[in-house]
Image (cartoon, coloured by chain):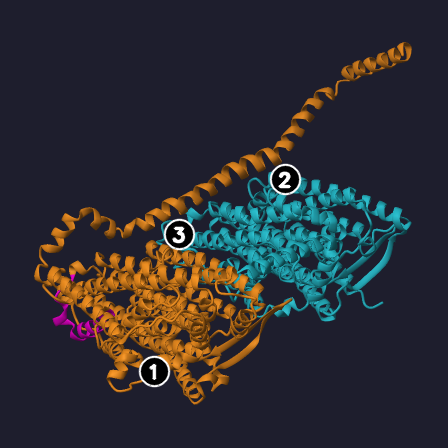
Amino acid sequence: MDKYIFLIPLFPLVGFLINGLFGKRLGKGVVSFIGCMTIAFSFLVALFIWKDLLSLEPEQRVFTQTLWEWMSVGGLKVDISFLIDPLSMLMILVVTGVGFLIHVYSTGYMYEDESYWRYFAYLNMFVFFMAMLVLGGNYLVMFVGWEGVGLASYLLIGFWYQEMDNAVAGKKAFVVNRIGDFGFVLGLFLMFWTFGSLSYQDVFPRALELFEHGGLSFNSPVLVAICLLLFVGATGKSAQIPLYVWLPDAMAGPTPVSALIHAATMVTAGVYMVARTNVLYTLAPTALLVVASIAAATAFFAATMGVLQNDIKKVLAYSTVSQLGYMFIGVGVTAYWAGIFHLMTHAFFKACLFLCSGSVIHAMGGDQDMRHMGGLAKKMPITYITMLVATLAIAGLPPFAGFFSKDEILGKAFSFAYYPVAGKIIWFIGTVGAGITAFYMFRLIFMTFHGEFRGTEEQRHHLHESPPTMTVPLIILATLSIVGGWLGIPEIIGRALGHVPNLVEGFLEPVFEHSHNILSAHAPHVHVSEAVEWTLMSTSVVVAIIGISLAYYIYMVHGKDLPQKLAEKYAFHYQVIYNKYYVDEIYEFLIVLPIYYLSVFFWKVVDAFFIDGIGVNGPAWLVKRLSSGARLVQNGYVQTYGTFMLIGLISILCFFIYR
Amino acid sequence: MNEPILTYVTFLPLLGLIFILPIPQKSESGKNVIRGIAFLISIFTFWASLRIYGAFDASIAGFQLVEDHVWIGSYGIHYKLGIDGLSLWLVLLTTFITPLTILSTWRAIDKRVKEFQVSLLVLETAMLGTFMALDLFLFYVFWELMLIPMYLIIGVWGGERRIYAAIKFFLYTAVGSLLMLVCIIGLVYFHHNHSGHLTFDLLQLYGTPIPRNYEILFFAAFALAFAIKVPMFPFHTWLPDAHVEAPTAGSVILAGILLKMGTYGFFRFAMPLFPQGSDYFAPLIILLSVIGIIYGALVAMVQPDIKKLVAYSSVSHLGYCMLGLYVLTRQGVEGSVLQMINHGISTGALFLLVGIIYERRHTRLIKEYGGIARIVPVYSTIFLIVTLSSIGFPTTNGFIGEFLILLGAFKVNKLAAVLAATGVILGAVYMLWMVQRVFYGQVRNPKNLHLKDMNLREVAYMVPLLILIFWIGLYPNFFLSKMHASVDHFISQVKVEQVEKTSHVALAQSIREAALSASKAKE
């Protein structure tokens, strides 16, 4: 099947072209059929390739395919090529699998929209570029996907472009991502001039070779620089500090888009990239420390920002930023597989959460404000139960998926080999953040599904459970939010249950093998006893329960007055957090406006006045003035000319006489 | 001697005048016949130029299909044409863009149709001649010949301030060219002193030993002439004026082809003729290129007029071309050549698109539009694709050019590469902001409610450009493979005099390495 890797991106591309070019005339049925089936086919192809991959020995599980030579200039040779190893396999299964469910859901959610065909064209285009990103065999093909998903995101955030705010949010996403890509591209330049290639299969072996022969050492400046520059790209795409600001605004797009692009797949591209580059990162501990620290800060701050949001999608948006932080903590403390594992479980439960919120918004007639909701559990039982499952998963309660993946990350942070002290601090921040996560997610559940309905009468009549096209994907995703975690259960639980293997870690092991070798050979070994591991695990469960209880106390027991009272008592803190620490305003004031006024200054003063006015038109003006002076002499009167002649003659005569 | 294909291609447009001149243009049908003939001639020229492509041998580094005839023997002036891997693409670009331009003028130019088409065809001959001439005198003749039809196109068919813009364009470029002429004669004089015979043949003039001071001086004069044409910061202010006043066809030719004369001049004449002078000024030129990239982008961002925005974006894009040329790495130079073609396609397409909407609404101010994506979906889609190409989106042509240039620059001058790369961010800002204000939101201006979408003729001349955008983006090797040999030759020509300097760098490198290993040993 490895000859057919190219089919995975090809199907969505064909779907995009058909729906994009002819969708308007095809009718909604055909458009949905093409839109969904292309993704289903890609998923099927991926499954077949997976089967083939599993039939190989673990060390040999790599398929490559080269389509054509893209560009070759001097030493630069870049192919349009694909690489499937366990890492990209897992990613593509998530992308096409979850992608398919969201496509199906969209047929219900978007059915009323007049630009239905355009929506599906964009969505297919997104899956095409995401497949390129994940399957690409070198960094430049990854970059094609990387910018491509950004384009799809731009178009889908601004899908309802007649609202100017949506178009602005789309542009903001694109531009902020471009800032990240600026770093990413510089990282690629440095990588190329260091290793002479951009292909995964050249760069990593060469890096290891150089490392063994002393050409590179731990924390070589060039390695740290490459890793940090690539991470700049990741902070853009995966919404980390300081470039996270576009993601909350991106909620302007249709909700299934938020689920697919801004939660389950695209935003995790940065995590995938770091995991893909694990060899270089493991050789650059300083870069890892930066990644893990920024990730921890993001995980914590985004969680606090989620606490006071009233827009149901904004809560989920900040929660996504926060959860992406956890994934980066994972890859940042060299627990690459754990980061990817959390990426996978997050794809399940966060997609489920977003789709549930979409179902709620659908029922509320487009209203996203949780202050208008309440008591929806009775009207929409399926949505309620699936969302509750996903919420328990993200809150990190066993046996739901998020518990296993988040706990693995925090446990690995606690035993971070390169920087043990920093690791403990990161663990602490992460654990507190997990408690806040549990708090704000249950705040969402309580405000939305419990208590009294607070919306208008009209909305109350309109309340209904969503159609099966929407609820079936919810049920599947909720199921995955439970069983997904059991694919990667921690060693000690596996032992306690009697040798249950950790499937995800085992499957991904060949990809991270070199990193593990480097770590075991060069990093100090941190031993964590079984008792400590159990303690850590119980700690996170306890913290989650505290968070949930607090939410229950504030929003259920004293839901009528306590939130209000707290807001008044801590008015300053409330305002700062409610306004998201004024980060957008600070950026506007410190970066956007100065550049704008500088540009106006360049245009009006430098360009129009100095360069053009004085530099170019100045000489022209001077010539004009001088010639109008000279013109006085040549006025056409014979008398004047005669006078000049006379003066001349006399002068010459004088000259000859008196010389 | 083989068939003189180059001469055929160069003078085909001029030959076509025989058919156009006798046709009366009083009636509408007469005008259409003139347009039709002009279009056919340009298509025929394009077809003929494809034969150049067929005859081109990518493995040869020097000039090919050379035609050499004595013109003014007593001064050693020849009629000599030839092409290499750079001019091949610029010739094809010229013959490709011209028919599209003629199609775009079908409705836009309604007065003095005959004179207009004649100007366009004369211009085409002049441009083709400039790209192929291998004799400095012949080159100069074609170079100056270009000015006249372009002057007329802006001055006669232009907008309100057309006379001002036309005169500014003419005088500004003429000033540079005159200095160049003086230095051409100076160069020939030195060559005569050295070798004893008088010639304007470029190939013989390459490598003429000139005193260093004179070489620097000569380079400065050539560079000024070409820098004005590029245009490099701070010689760019004629460009926005010329673009805004020129009719669409004029802007397309101006941006698509005429600006390439500047970069082509550096590549063909200024740098290989005077390597030492080029080396002397290299830091300044790299600095001005980087300033141009950022400055052009910033000023483009705040323009209220779409056409002026595109004009300033040209300053930014051409900055990349100059940067690529001057880093003298293979990636940089090939990226630069590719970016010249890219700019011709993308910016040409943008001007055509601006022209389409100007024809309907007679305004180019951004604030007059808003929300028109719903009214003119085909137009909006094509505009967005061209925008993506202009901001260097991967899979389009713009990405390949910018990536190669910056990659090549990064090796030589990290700071310049980093600063230039910020232009990629700014490019997205000014283009997408404009797109947002023109196409998105509600339709606020009632005049836009009944805008007509693109008709078949308009789509017909955009589609070839769109195909090329993706062709270069997805399979640039088709274009790059033809220029490898010529670019290598160029780099060796320009770098040849700098052996001393490179050994300097190598020395510094070895010292640094020694220090590094010493510090390692200490550990």
| Magenta stretch: includes residue A525 | no
Q: Which chain is orange?
A: A
Q: Secondary structure at mark 3?
A: loop
Instruction: Give A529 or B118, whichever is nearer the viewer.
Output: A529
Q: CA distance from mark 3 to mark 1?
A: 54 Å
User: Which residue is denoted by mark 2 in the rendering?
Assistant: B168
* Camera sees residue A21: no
Give the x, y percent position of residue B272.
74, 54
Q: What is the drawing colour of chain B? A: cyan
Q: Secondary structure at mark 2?
A: helix
Q: Chain of mark 3?
A: B
Task: Determine which of the numbered discs, if any, sits on residue B370 in the image.
Answer: 3
Relative to A12, A164 lies left or right:
left
Task: Determine which of the numbered discs, if any, sits on residue A503 in the image.
Answer: 1
Residue A336 sits in quarter: bottom left
Relative to A483, A16 lies left or right:
right
